[in-house]
Structure formats: structure tokens, C-alpha cells
Amino acid sequence: MSELSWPLLLLAMVVGAALTLGITHKRQSRRSSAGGYPPGYVQGVQDLFSSQPDKAVAVFMKMLELDPSTVEPHFALATLFRKKGEVERAIRIHQNLISRNGLEPEHKRRALEGLARDYLHAGLLDRAETIANNLLETDPKNQEGMRILLSIFELESEWDKAISIAEKLLGTGGILPSVLAQYYCELAELHRHGGNETAARRAIKQALNHDEECPRAGMILGDIEMAAGHVRAAIRNYQRVAWKSPEYLSEIVAPMLTCFGRTDASQATFNTLKKLVLDQSAIDPVLQMTEYMIGKGEEVEAGEYIRGFLHDRPSLEGLRYLMDQSPADPHGRDENHRVVKETIYKLSSASKRYRCDKCGFSGQKLHWQCPSCRVWGQTRPI
Ligand SMILES: [Zn+2]
């Protein structure tokens, strides 16, 4: 048997089974919503080839060649083309479907939804928005129309509009409360930077209403309180985030220590923070705690603190800090000391500090919405 025989045989079996099922089904029922094929079978074929899009395209092309009047293979092909990055082909398929005479209303709706999503992928946001709005005029509960509008408003940072749509989607389970909380946080940040503290506080209150453990909302509220001179209130907010979401300590320790420097914080709170920081894997908060202790004249304790951390979790950043603290070699090997130091600097500055749990995207900055997979609240300090 040639090297192509098995894949081709499999392909033929799938097409054959699919078409047989489709023909049988057509005889049994004229009201099939799958355009002549049993519900779910095209999806099955699509899933089967999800890892082999070129073969899947060949299968669906073959189906259309044998029976051009069917509808489902068009939808499957368009989705595959979009996933493969061939958005123009997906657009043409959806446009052809929409212009087809006698197309059932259900299929027309799906074709319009597909076309709107194609335009969104192609960056043609005005066109996508127009279609999504038309879909919602016909059916105010159209979820895909709402999701497309939501993606557009996210891309354009139109947070008021995003919140309005998300509030509607929330009731249908089409969005997580934690994502809506992120929109309110975005709005709060805008108001803060615009100098409107009252509106920023109102937005944060809404964020916490939807997600009482939203770490970002707690951090923003801490920042607002600190800017207003309410140091103890700021500490309370940072502390709540630190205790409930210690993975974000690298964002909280610096402002907490600033607050500690401005008021008499309890030693118990400081000790709890020290322990929490040591339990995490991020080096930044360890360095911040170390510096704070040195500033208070606790050099010996600070040295033990960072060395204890590095003993269990080696880190270039930590090594770089220790090198900075070490005097040059007194035995004439200064050049070696300088090269080692420079090398550590280069290596440590190239290391990533945040990573998205969902897609693995990593970078130097904390993005509350991952720039790669667009998921909210999954990027965390490494
Ligand atoms: Zn991601």
C-alpha cells in the first residue's frame, strides 16, 4: 500500500459515511436544519480534521462538488478558511450564501454572523459592527451579535459601550462576571487618569459588586486611597489583595511598603507580608522587601532573607542584586567581576516577567487582557 493509501482511505470513508448519512437523512426528513445532513455530523468531520485543515478543506470541497445545494459544508469551509487565516475566502463563502435565493432564515442568520466575524478578523470593524447591529435589531438576544460588538468595543477601548453589552450578556451566561469587573476596572482607570476620583470609585464599586475578589479592583482602590492621603485605607485594600491573590504580590508590595513608610503599620502585618512573599516564586517582591529592611537598618536580616529565597529558587534577578551588593574582587580579578556582572545584567533583563496561563504569551508588562489570546485576568507574574 502506498504512503498515501491510509489517509486517503480514511478520507474516503469519512466522505462516504457522511454522504450516505446525508442522503439517508434527506429521504427521512425534508426539514433538516443541517441542509440535508444529520445534525452534528459535519461538526464531527470538522473536529476530525481540526488538526489537518488542508485535508478538511478537501473533504468539504468534495462534498460540495457532489451536492452543491447543501449548506453545512459552506459554513464548515468558511470557518476553516478563517482559522487558516484565509479570511477573504471565508468572506466570499458567507457572501455567496447570503445572496442565495430561498435560503432559510436560520441559515441566513448564521451566514451573517459568520460574515461579521470574518470582518472582525480582517480588522474591518465598521462592517462587522453594522452587521452585528442589524442582527440585534432583528433579535435583541442574538448572542453572537453581542459577542462581536463586545470584541469591537474592547479593541476600541469603548468601555461604557462594552459594559452596556456585557450587562445584557451576563444574564444569559454569555460572559463571566470577572470579565465585566475588568471592564469596570478599565473605566475606573480612565476616570482616575482624567482626575475624576468620584467616578473612578463608582466604577470600582461596580467591579467589586460583580467580582468581590477582583485583585485589580482592590489594587486600583488602594491607589485611589493612597493618592487621597488615606494611607490606612490603602493598606487595607492592598492587604486584602495580597492575602487573597498572593500571585499578584509583585504589584502590591511596593505600594504597601510606601504606605508602611508613611504610617505605623503593625509588625504582625509586616511579618505576614514577609512570609507571603517568601512563599511565592516571584523575585521582585523579595528584592523590594530586602531593600525595605536595609532601609530600616536590618542589613543582616535582609541578607538572610534574600539568600534564603535564592537557595530554594535560583534567580538571575536575585543574583544580579547580590552582585550589586558585592564589592569588586580585591585580588586583581576586577575584569572577571565586571564581565560576570554584565553577563548577569544582560541575561536577567532579557527574562520575561509575566505569562498568560491560557496561551503562554509572555512579556515584561502585566496585561490584564492577554494581547495574544484576548483572555482577561490570566496573565500573571512568573
Ligand atoms: Zn493568552
Image (cartoon, helix red, strand yellow):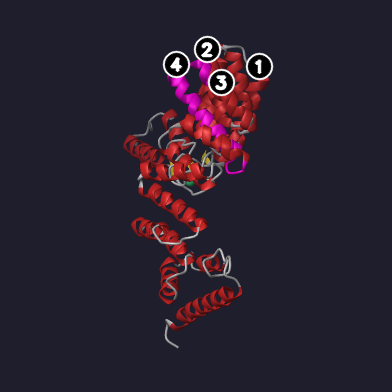
Q: Nearer the viewer, mark 4 or mark 1?
A: 4
Helix, strand or loop for disc 1? loop
Residue drawn at the location 40% of the way across and 45% of the way down = 128
Q: Are marks 2 and 1 in contact (CB under 8 Å)?
A: no
Whole-angstrom CA distance, mark 4 to mark 3, is 13 Å
Disc 2 to disc 1, C-alpha distance: 21 Å
The kind of residue tagged 2 is Ala
Residue tagged 2: 228
Q: Earlier in the sequence, mark 2 or mark 3?
A: 3
What amino acid is found at the position of numbered circle 4 in the picture?
Answer: Gly
Neighbour tally class for label 2: few under 14, some 14-19, many 20 plus, Cα within 10 Å: few
Per the rendered image, the range of residues in magenta is: 172-200
Q: Nearer the viewer, mark 1 or mark 3?
A: 3
Residue 266 bears which disc, if any?
Answer: 1
Q: Are marks 1 and 3 in contact (CB under 8 Å)?
A: no
Residue with the most extreme right position:
268
Image depth: mark 4 or mark 2 in front: 4
State the residue position of label 4.
195
In this figure, which residue is indicated by the disc labeled 3? 202
Tell me if 140 is positioned left or right of 77 in this view.
right
Q: Are marks 4 and 1 in contact (CB under 8 Å)?
A: no
* Labels 1 and 3: the sequence-earlier one: 3
